[in-house]
Image (tube, grey):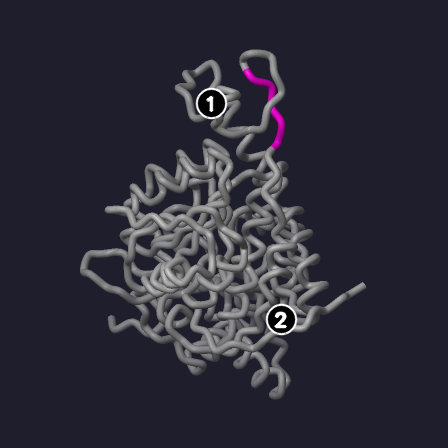
């Protein structure tokens, strides 16, 4: 039963929505380094600190590697921790991303998706976060500024759950979302603080035979991230995989509880279906592109075309069962990738969707479209063309070009 709480409408861009949510989540430590198009997040949060609106300790580090190291240290000491980055900043964190997830430190990080150099480009695509998809972080991709706000709040509760204890990336498309002003419904501060709650630390057995909270504490000494040689390392990694499996249910649970007080939902929290019930052809994508696709679907439906969309919201952990179920009656599928896997015969989302469908009862036609690299616009006309391609594939029962490029000069 829903108990919707009154909310205020603010004009916020995606970056400001992140900062506002982090402020309300009662964060203890923010360690960050500015990088376009993420800079607004840490600028706004530093203003909250300077104005006395939060009691957060803000640490402006000398690099993103140091920012993640500081967040790791704070999180393992029991603090609620947040940071934000983009592109080369995320790449510079690469080593520490693996350390953070391996130490089971529930850091929440906003990733404002941006292309990686060279040549240098400051605009949005998914090459940065896709390069880190196997780093042990949960990845949530938002469609608009409202979802950015909602997902950031949910991320703290997901990450800190004792059955999960994994870091979370909330990904938003650079400039398309980060710098675009939208109406965002926000809760009063006390509502968010209550929803997120106080971080609960699991109890573990120390080397002294005592039960103590799982954190670095001189009163109860313990080691995190020690050397693990072949006789132990494998088991640590297996535990992380089990935590990812636990996260699937936790993401849905947190999403549903949030929906009860906000009256907003994004599918089941893992994937969102749009007109898929009777769809013959469908697009799969991540992030803000889904908004354009939905508009085209509405037009096609008015013309009698049974088109649909599956937006993958949670890319890690990948919602395998949900993807199979959602696509069980679809004949032709176009997977849109805003990143390339050089030499890999298609983009990363395409690889994973085809892998999932290999074990399904039905095997639809699947084609890959690489699009929007370096922030290049993808128009409704181009989306419509993708659906036309799918209709032709179904008619001819042939996929002549399994990998195509949208809006590229060749």
Q: At numbered mark 1, what does the secondary structure look like: helix, strand or loop?
A: loop
Residue ID for mark 2: 274
Compared across the picture, whether 41 is left or right of 6 comes to left
Compared across the picture, whether 352 is left or right of 372 comes to right
Specify the farthest residue to the left: 119
Residue ID for mark 1: 218
Q: Which numbered disc flags the more N-terminal residue, 2 or 1?
A: 1
Q: Residue at x 53, y 59 (%)?
A: 24
Q: Measured from the top left, where is residue 53 in percent x and y?
A: 46, 61
Q: Is residue 205 magenta?
A: yes
Q: Residue at x 42, y 19 (%)?
A: 228
Specify the farthest residue to the front: 52
Specify the farthest residue to the top: 208
Between 16 and 50, the one lying in front of the other is 50
Q: Identify whether 88 is placed above or below 217.
A: below
Q: Measured from the top left, where is residue 391 in percent x and y?
A: 54, 74
Indicate the quadrant where residue 307 lies.
Answer: bottom right
Q: Measured from the top left, where is residue 237 in percent x and y?
A: 49, 29
Between 155 and 202, the one lying in front of the other is 202
- Give the residues drawn in magenta, as a range: 202-206
Q: Residue at x 42, y 40 (%)?
A: 135
Q: Residues within 10 Å of mark 1 (few under 14, many from 20)?
A: few
Q: At numbered mark 2, what does the secondary structure look like: helix, strand or loop?
A: strand
Q: Is residue 100 at all visible to an observer of this figure? A: yes
Indicate the quadrant where residue 404 lies.
Answer: bottom left
Q: Mark 2 to mark 1: distance in Å?
A: 52 Å
Q: Is residue 404 at all visible to an observer of this figure? A: no
What is the number of callouts on the image?
A: 2
Quadrant placement of the N terminus: bottom right
Q: Residue at x 48, y 64 (%)?
A: 20
Q: Residues within 10 Å of mark 2 (few under 14, many from 20)?
A: many
Indicate the quadrant where residue 322 lies.
Answer: bottom right
């Amino acid at each position: 039963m829903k108990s919707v709480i009154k909310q205020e409408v603010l004009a916020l861009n995606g970056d400001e929505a992140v900062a506002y949510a982090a402020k309300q989540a009662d964060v203890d430590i923010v360690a960050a380094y500015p990088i376009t198009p993420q800079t607004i997040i840490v600028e706004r949060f530093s203003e909250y600190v300077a104005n006395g609106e939060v009691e957060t300790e803000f640490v402006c580090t000398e690099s993103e590697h140091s920012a993640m190291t500081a967040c790791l240290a704070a999180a393992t000491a029991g603090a609620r921790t947040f940071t934000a980055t983009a592109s080369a900043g995320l790449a510079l964190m690469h080593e520490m991303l693996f350390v953070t997830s391996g130490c089971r430190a529930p850091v929440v990080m906003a990733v404002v998706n941006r292309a990686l150099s060279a040549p240098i480009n400051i605009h949005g695509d998914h090459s940065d976060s896709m390069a880190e998809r196997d780093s042990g972080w949960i990845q949530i991709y938002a469609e608009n500024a409202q979802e950015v706000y909602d997902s950031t709040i949910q991320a703290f509760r997901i990450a800190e759950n004792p059955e999960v204890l994994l870091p979370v990336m909330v990904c938003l498309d650079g400039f398309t979302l980060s710098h675009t002003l939208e109406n965002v419904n926000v809760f009063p501060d006390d509502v968010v603080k209550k929803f997120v709650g106080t971080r609960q630390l699991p109890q573990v057995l120390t080397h002294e035979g005592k039960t103590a909270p799982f954190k670095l504490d001189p009163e109860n000494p313990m080691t995190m991230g020690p050397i693990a040689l072949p006789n132990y390392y494998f088991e640590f990694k297996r535990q992380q995989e089990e935590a990812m499996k636990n996260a699937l249910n936790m993401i849905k649970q947190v999403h549903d509880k949030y929906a009860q007080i906000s009256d907003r939902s994004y599918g089941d929290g893992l994937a969102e279906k749009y007109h898929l019930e009777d769809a013959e052809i469908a697009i799969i994508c991540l992030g803000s592109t889904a908004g354009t696709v939905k508009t085209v679907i509405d037009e096609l439906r008015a013309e009698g075309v049974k088109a649909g969309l599956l937006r993958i919201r949670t890319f890690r952990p990948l919602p395998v069962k949900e993807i199979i179920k959602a696509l069980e009656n679809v004949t032709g599928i176009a997977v849109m990738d805003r990143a390339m896997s050089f030499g890999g015969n298609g983009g990363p989302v395409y690889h994973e969707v085809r892998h999932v469908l290999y074990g399904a009862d039905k095997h639809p036609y699947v084609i890959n479209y690489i699009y929007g690299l370096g922030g290049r616009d993808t128009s409704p006309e181009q989306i419509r063309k993708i659906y036309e391609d799918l209709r032709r594939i179904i008619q001819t029962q042939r996929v002549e070009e399994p990998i195509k490029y949208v809006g590229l000069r060749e």
